[in-house]
Amino acid sequence: MKISIISGSHRNPSQSEKVARYIENTIRRRKPEIDTWLFALADNPLPLWDQSVWENDDAWTQRLAPLKQELASSDGFVIVSPEWHGQAPAGLKNFFLLFSRFELGHKPALIVTVSNGDGGAYPVAELRMSSYKNNRICYIPEQVIVRHVEKVLNDNAADNIPDADAYFRERIDWALDLLQGYAVALKTMRETTQIHHDRFGNGM
Ligand SMILES: Cc1cc2nc3c(=O)[nH]c(=O)nc-3n(C[C@H](O)[C@H](O)[C@H](O)COP(=O)(O)O)c2cc1C
């Protein structure tokens, strides 16, 4: 099994990437049998989508090929999004323009959102509403909203609020267990179901 983690912040460094790396390390420590791949949108490694993406442009093909390979070989995803002005960052929405049902389709994903205050609900709602239609990524019902992120999940225990830090570590463990269960179940579903249909390439 392979779980890929997407860190949606353009900032470098960012709290979202801190959380994404914590999640990757947690999977490696608790479930060494699971392969991981972390892709950070720090410093915007992907240009904005343009028409040539759909015209077999060489530069785009070469840029996307290794990423498509990593995503297509994944069984599940963790999508980490900061809340920026009440939204998911543009780079993360661009990610969902560039990758399709052939990489993401009918695979489970855990949404993890990040706020340095009491925010974090808006990108959950946005991702659930408008990032899955054509690529058919399957967001699981559980989600994690890491509020006051600067005070939790830090390597240095002195930087953490102990109760909040323990709560998020336990909650992330449980959410990852659920993601693994969905990944097992949906792999069987993909293997036993015709998941692509020539006439229904896009969702309604
Ligand atoms: C452009 C921008 C807009 C932001 N807007 C919000 C917001 O609407 N709600 C919120 O809770 N935090 C907001 N924040 C603060 C983030 O919660 C904070 O930067 C946190 O560390 C997550 O972002 P990061 O992963 O880029 O570090 C914003 C940050 C930036 C850079």
Image: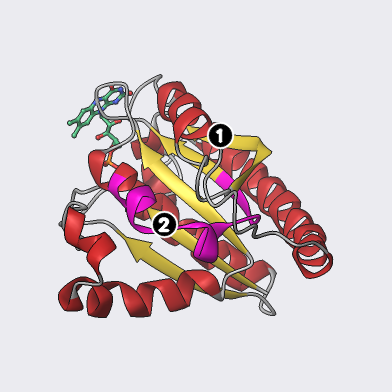
Drawn side of residue 70 relative to residue 11, left or right = right
* Quadrant of the snapshot with the C terminus: top right
Q: Which mark is residue 204?
A: 1
Task: Residue 29: name its quadrant.
Answer: bottom right
Q: Residue at x 31, y 21 (%)?
A: 86
The number of numbered discs placed on residues in the rendered structure image is 2
Mark 1 Cα within 10 Å, few/some/many (few <14, many 20+)?
few
Above or below, 18 relative to 120: below
Q: Disc 1 residue type? A: Met
Task: Report if residue 84 is visible in the image.
Answer: yes
Q: Which residues are magenta?
A: 94-110
Q: Dot 2 corresponds to which residue?
A: 6
Q: For the residue marked with disc 2, what is the amino acid? A: Ile
Q: Residue at x 53, y 65 (%)?
A: 102
- Mark pair 1, 2: CA separation: 26 Å
Mark 2 residue crowding within 10 angstroms, few (<14) / some (14–19) / many (20+): many
